[in-house]
């Protein structure tokens, strides 16, 4: 039987997903569970085990050569641990050791979820063929990953490009990470909805009090909803421009649930980038929505798994 697959786990604040993936990026088996982020460490581990168990019980599991994990961060690739800001019940959790034990000692690679998104977009998405890119996921949290000199740049611990915890408001509110004024406190879906509600916005008929509901209201012209997205766009633009100035990327790619707001987000983001990306070598920065969809984290985690095997896909 050929060994021509890798397994992938995508661990985030909303869902834990798993898949078996071939070298072309196709998902042959896929499963997921809601993330019990605030229940208990044991419940979190059991949920991850459930997802992994579905993969290992699939007939195709015999073809798996390695496993890649993309997790909400920060992660520590050297230690094999995760301490996701938006999963408070896991701190220094020995994820890699547990996964390796449950898979019979398979090689395991761990990267941050933003790095996984960057790997997916560079492999199959909007950053394909680009020498320098920042790829972001804007959802329950805000993460990112970098492509530099045509290759994924995870950094020594697997966190490089973690743009959600760059401070863009020095006197801003306290972030769960311990810093102040982080991009995530301004631009995550949770905080977009919270700011809109704090400003007096209320969901209309058929809407809910989430970032998606705020986006629908903004699309219909509600000024408070539009202001909430403009505030998020300003934070994202400041961080993107700072990153481009530092490492000279060619393109910024944005995915995740907030990016699905479309022009509600991208129109003010383009305008804010003009204000912040002012130096000559960053003025030509391209901006694009991610194209790898809801399975980007799995595709990127698989890319990390293939890299373990010296199979270059991203």
Image (tube, grey):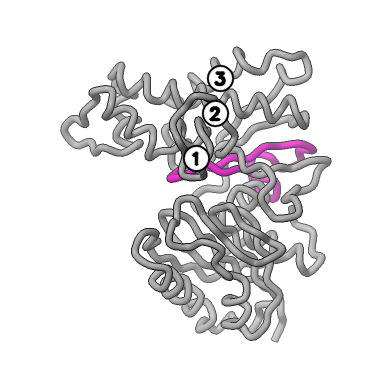
The residue shown at (62%, 43%) is 162
Closest to the observer, 3 or 15: 15
**Region in magenta:** 121-144
Q: Is residue 201 visible?
A: yes
Q: Is residue 288 left or right of residue 2?
A: left
Q: Is residue 221 visible?
A: no
Question: Does residue 235 lie above or below 259 as drawn?
Answer: above
CA gap between label 2 and label 1 equals: 9 Å
Question: Does residue 165 lie above or below 170 as drawn?
Answer: below
- Estimate the x, y position of residue 256 in percent, counting from the top left: 49, 43
Closest to the observer, 22 or 118: 118
- Estimate the x, y position of residue 51 in percent, counting from the top left: 46, 72
- Estimate the x, y position of residue 207 in percent, counting from the top left: 23, 36
Of tags 3 and 2, the one toward the viewer is 2
Looking at marks 3 and 2 on the same chain, the residue that comes earlier in the sequence is marked by: 2
The residue shown at (43%, 62%) is 89
Residue that lies at the very extreme toward the left in this rendered image: 205
The residue that disc 1 covers is 138
Does the magenta segment cover residue 136?
yes
Q: Circles 3 and 1: CB distance less than 8 Å?
A: no
Looking at marks 2 and 1 on the same chain, the residue that comes earlier in the sequence is marked by: 1
Question: Does residue 206 lie above or below 38 as drawn?
Answer: above
The residue that disc 3 covers is 270
Of tags 3 and 1, the one toward the viewer is 1
Q: Which image quadrant is residue 275 in?
A: top right
Q: Is residue 54 left or right of residue 237?
A: left
SS type, badge 3: helix
CA gap between label 3 and label 2 equals: 10 Å
SS type, badge 2: helix
CA gap between label 3 and label 1 equals: 16 Å
The residue shown at (45%, 36%) is 174
Q: Which image quadrant is residue 305 in?
A: bottom right
């Amino acid at each position: 039987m050929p060994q021509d697959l890798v397994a992938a786990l995508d661990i985030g604040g909303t869902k834990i997903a798993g898949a078996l993936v071939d070298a072309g990026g196709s998902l042959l088996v896929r499963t997921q569970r809601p993330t019990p982020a605030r229940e208990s460490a044991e419940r979190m581990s059991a949920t991850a085990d459930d997802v992994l168990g579905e993969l290992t019980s699939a007939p195709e599991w015999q073809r798996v050569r390695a496993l890649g994990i993309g997790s909400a961060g920060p992660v520590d690739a050297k230690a094999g641990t995760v301490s996701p800001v938006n999963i408070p019940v896991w701190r220094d959790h020995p994820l890699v050791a547990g996964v390796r034990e449950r898979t019979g000692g398979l090689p395991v690679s761990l990267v941050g979820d933003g790095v996984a998104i960057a790997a997916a977009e560079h492999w199959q998405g909007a950053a394909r063929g680009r020498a320098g890119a920042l790829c972001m996921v804007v959802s329950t949290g805000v993460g990112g990953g970098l492509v530099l000199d045509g290759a994924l740049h995870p950094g020594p611990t697997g966190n490089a490009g973690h743009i959600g915890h760059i401070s863009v408001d020095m006197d801003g509110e306290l972030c769960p990470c311990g810093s102040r004024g982080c991009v995530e406190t301004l631009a995550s879906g949770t905080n977009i909805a919270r700011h809109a509600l704090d400003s007096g916005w209320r969901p209309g008929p058929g809407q809910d009090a989430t970032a998606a509901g705020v986006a629908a209201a903004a699309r219909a012209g509600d000024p408070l909803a539009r202001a909430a997205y403009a505030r998020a766009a300003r934070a994202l633009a400041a961080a993107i421009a700072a990153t481009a100035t530092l490492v000279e990327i060619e393109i910024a790619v944005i995915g995740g649930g907030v990016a699905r707001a479309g022009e509600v987000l991208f129109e003010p983001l383009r305008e804010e980038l003009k204000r912040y990306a002012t130096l000559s070598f960053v003025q030509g920065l391209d901006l694009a929505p991610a194209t790898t969809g809801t399975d980007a984290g799995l595709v990127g985690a698989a890319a990390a798994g293939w890299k373990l095997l010296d199979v270059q896909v991203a």
